[in-house]
Image: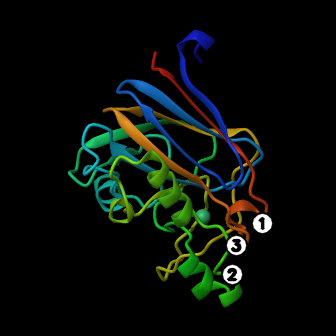
Amino acid sequence: MSTESQMLIDAVVPAGEPWMGVVPKGHRFRIVDLEGNQAVDTLFYNAADTHEHYSAQNTIQAQGNLYLGAGSVLRSNRGRAMLSIIADTCGRHDTLGGACSAESNTVRYALDKRHMHSCRDSFLLALALRDDGLCKRDLPSNINFFMNVPVTPAGGLTFADGISAAGRHVDLVAHMDILVLISNCPQLNNPCNAYNPTPVRVQSWIAA
Ligand SMILES: [Zn+2]
């Protein structure tokens, strides 16, 4: 762990809120699940060229595994290594479940859930506030850190109870300057947040 003076980012993302920041090449990026079982919907972009972004398909194909954990290399839509997961005290992160939205809340749950906060709306709000040209078309499939979406033997997806806990964290190292977009998931209708969205902490410092 670094000293305070080397800390580039140290922020608490409140329950249900979005966050954006830039992690320079060679820096570590840590996400801490402060209270446990909180899904952190995350997208990564090449900060120098945001047309390059995290690709679930290329990442899964290259590592030959559906789940993300220590040793996973997160690849871009151009097949390049963007970040690597170098430490992980949770052990399971989802790359298939996608982001909740007004539409999915309506289809999965009920019409009267349509107005509820969603990750897709949080992503769009953060991009609009940043105002650097990124918009709806720049939202590919995201990572859900700390979210447990096991695949059944028949190939089904299940949104299962989380396996994370208070204080668990994931550490990544950036292989290029990375723009990070997070929706600290506000979902109340499935167990991805244990029905109780909570804050997370993000930190970045120079990798040793
Ligand atoms: Zn969500």
Residue 202 in the figure: left or right of residue 180: right
Q: Are marks 3 and 2 in contact (CB under 8 Å)?
A: no
Q: Residues within 10 Å of mark 3 (few under 14, many from 20)?
A: some
**Mark toward the start of the polypeptide (3 vs 2):** 2
Q: Residue flagged by tag 1: what amino acid is it?
A: Tyr
Q: Residues within 10 Å of mark 1 (few under 14, many from 20)?
A: some
* Residue shown at 40% from the left, 48% from the top: 131
Question: Label 3, label 2: how many angstroms apart (C-alpha)?
Answer: 12 Å
Dot 1: element? loop
> Is any part of residue 71 visible from this angle?
yes
Residue identified by numbered label 3:
190
* Residue shown at 77% from the left, 66% from the top: 195
Dot 3: element? loop
* Tag shown at residue 195: 1
Vertically, is 101 above or below 67? below
Q: Are marks 1 and 2 in contact (CB under 8 Å)?
A: no
Coloring basis for residues: rainbow
Instruction: Give the label, 3 or 2, closer to the camera.
Output: 2
Split into quadrants, the picture shows ligand 1 in the one at bottom right
Q: Residues within 10 Å of mark 2 (few under 14, many from 20)?
A: some
Question: Label 1, label 2: how many angstroms apart (C-alpha)?
Answer: 14 Å
Q: Is ligand 1 closer than 8 angstroms to the Cβ of mark 1?
A: no
Residue 188 horizontal/vertical position (percent): 73, 69
Q: Residue flagged by tag 3: what amino acid is it?
A: Asn
Question: Label 3, label 1: how many angstroms apart (C-alpha)?
Answer: 6 Å
Residue identified by numbered label 2:
113
**Mark toward the start of the polypeptide (3 vs 1):** 3
Residue 192 horizontal/vertical position (percent): 67, 64
Residue 22 horizontal/vertical position (percent): 43, 34
